[in-house]
Image: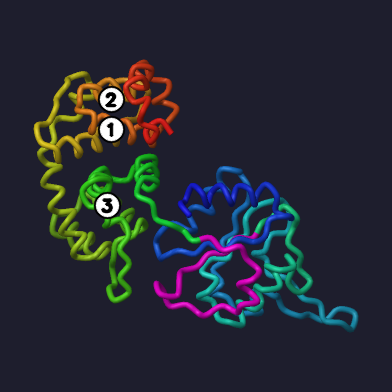
Amino acid sequence: MKASEITAVIDASVGNPQSVPALFIWGGPGVGKSSVVKQVADQHKIGFIDIRLLLLDPTDLRGIPVPEDGYAKWLAPSFLPKDGSGILHLDELNRAPVLTQNSALQLVLDRRVGEYELPEGWVIIASGNREMEAFVHRMDPALLNRFVHLEFEVDLDEWVRWANAHDINPVVIGLLSHFRPNLLYQFDKSKKSFPTPRSWQFVSEVLGMGLSPQITNELVQGSVGQGAAIELSTYMKIWQELPNLDKILAGEDIIPKTVDIIYACCVGLVSKAKVQANYDRLLKYSMKLNREFTVFLIKMLFGKDREKCVKSKSWAEVSKVLVKDDKVLG
């Protein structure tokens, strides 16, 4: 399932925590499983507790026994929610030791562990890496059967929309959106560094640090691996040939002559689109391009901020031209 589809499922769970079974999100390392869960909690303005079960002993979750009136009473850990509503995220559940997983079994099934009971407004969501993509412990079938299992699919279009909305460096977006889309996620268990959505975010941050080219290249290699770093370095040469993007935003209809520069130019312009006037200008500019690039530019603008596109003075004209292209308008 794509991130947007998983988000829809989590939305439904948050809206009805008592009736919807606990969810388990499976996916490779660095694809954004935890981020999707937290994003839903933030959107709903509810609590979010992330528990890394790998770091816990069984008693850390169940609590510890203390004597009271001749009986043992279990004191629940302070990190479990006591009231309100939210998402209790059991992160990397299948990396936790088997005994810790067993402690989580009762919490998932009965919404309680020991003498602790999960408040009614809280929903349980777990996540973990697939066996072939990480060092994990095989989960007990009894625990697996307590979840509805979802497979997280890395989708380029959704990642590009997310990247544009979160100010990821346009050089990274440009490389992955058209030139090397296969580099968004390339798991390689034999290497220390490999491309993932998370490691490309690291690269974006590295490019903004203002370090020397040599150090920057070392850090990029340390984030996504040597092969991806070479591809990025090659693409950055294309980026250096871009026209003055500020002049285009100001109203000059500068059209690059080569395909690679036009694509890079579109990505750069989208990264600079901040206010309504930028969207008005870029939608109008898109109509000066060949249809392939018109669609590409509008699709990226639409993914970054749908509302600003629709409010644009040029939107009516653009809609007529692209009415047959459901991908752009969907």
Q: Which residue lies furthest to the right in this view?
A: 69
Height in image: 267 above or below 31? above
Residue position marked by numbered label 1 in the rendering: 297
Span shown in magenta: 124-150
Describe the element under mark 2 as helix, strand or loop. Answer: helix
Residue position marked by numbered label 3 in the rendering: 181
Compared across the picture, whether 32 is left or right of 91 comes to left
The residue lying at 53 percent from left, 64 percent from top is: 127
C-beta proximity under 8 Å, tags 2 and 1:
yes
Identify residue type, mark 1. Answer: Leu
- Distance from disc 3 to disc 2, alpha carbons, whole Å, reads 24 Å
Provide residue 19's location: percent of width, then percent of height.
73, 55
Badge 1: residue crowd in 10 Å (few <14, some 14–19, many ≥20): many
Q: Which of 319 and 262 is in front in this view?
A: 319
Magenta stretch: includes residue 317: no
Q: Which corner quadrant of the image does residue 253 belong to? A: top left
- Distance from disc 2 to disc 1, alpha carbons, whole Å, reads 8 Å
Height in image: 111 above or below 304? below
Residue position marked by numbered label 2 in the rendering: 282
C-beta proximity under 8 Å, tags 3 and 2:
no
Describe the element under mark 3 as helix, strand or loop. Answer: helix
What is the image's colouring? rainbow
- Distance from disc 3 to disc 1, alpha carbons, whole Å, reads 17 Å
Identify residue type, mark 2. Answer: Leu
Compared across the picture, whether 205 is left or right of 288 comes to right
